[in-house]
Amino acid sequence: MSDTLEQLAAVLDARRSADPDNSYVAQLHHRGLNKILEKVGEEATETLLAAKDFEVDDARSRQDLVGEVADLWFHSLVMLSHLDIDHREVLAELARRAGVSGLDEKASRQRDS
Ligand SMILES: N=c1c2ncn([C@@H]3O[C@H](COP(=O)(O)OP(=O)(O)OP(=O)(O)O)[C@@H](O)[C@H]3O)c2ncn1[C@@H]1O[C@H](COP(=O)(O)O)[C@@H](O)[C@H]1O
């Protein structure tokens, strides 16, 4: 999975300077941050609607949900690339959190505030 992410990130990087007539990603960069954020918001909404409709024994609803999450991840990666943030920073943040219970982390934040 991480290979797929690495390969996609490399393609997204190259598309920043590609011709918008030949590339959807270049088109998004060309249209700017607001358009990219609009797509992230749209895909997030479509993801939660697909999740609400998900039925465990229905292959179609599984495919719908998987497809929407892929659209959301993809557009989030375009957003990071547009803002010059390396996706590996997100992976490093997730790695940093590994093994830290969300409940413990929340309790420590409440103690600190
Ligand atoms: N993973 C994706 C990917 N996932 C989704 N999409 C596109 O994201 C769009 C999803 O938006 P919608 O479903 O809302 O479609 P739409 O109505 O056409 O979108 P808008 O007109 O509202 O912008 C579709 O056009 C999909 O084809 C993707 N486009 C590209 N990639 C990857 O990015 C690479 C580079 O793509 P290009 O820049 O187009 O060469 C590709 O080789 C793929 O690996």
Image: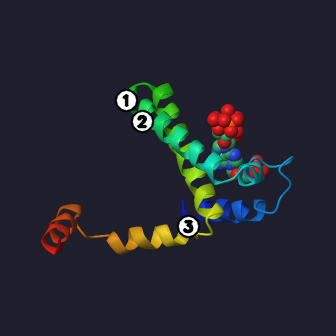
Q: Secondary structure at mark 3?
A: helix
**What amino acid is labelled 3 in the image?**
His
Q: Amino acid at mark 1?
A: Lys
Query: Is residue 44 at all visible to an observer of this figure?
Result: yes
In the image, taking residue 78 as reference, residue 58 lies left or right, namely left
The answer to whether 28 is drawn above or below residue 18 in the figure is: above
Q: Which mark is residue 36?
A: none
Image point 58% across, 43% down: which residue?
A: 38
- The residue lying toward the viewer, choosing from 1 and 37, is 37
Residue 48: image tag: 2
Q: Tell me the kind of residue under disc 2.
A: Leu
- In the picture of the structure, the residue carrying the numbered disc 3 is 87
Q: Which residue is mark 1?
A: 52
How far apart are labels 2 and 3 at the CA level?
Answer: 23 Å
101 versus 30 height, above or below: below
Residue 32, placed above or below residue 95 = above
Which numbered disc, 2 or 3, marks the residue that appears first in the sequence? 2
Snapshot quadrant of residue 81 = bottom right
Q: Residue at x 52, y 31 (%)?
A: 64
Judge the density around disc 1: few (<14), some (14-19), many (≥20) Cα neighbours within 10 Å. few
* Alpha carbon separation for disc pair 3 and 1: 28 Å
- Residue at point 62%, 66% (across, down): 6
Residue 56 seen in the figure: no
Q: Secondary structure at mark 1?
A: helix
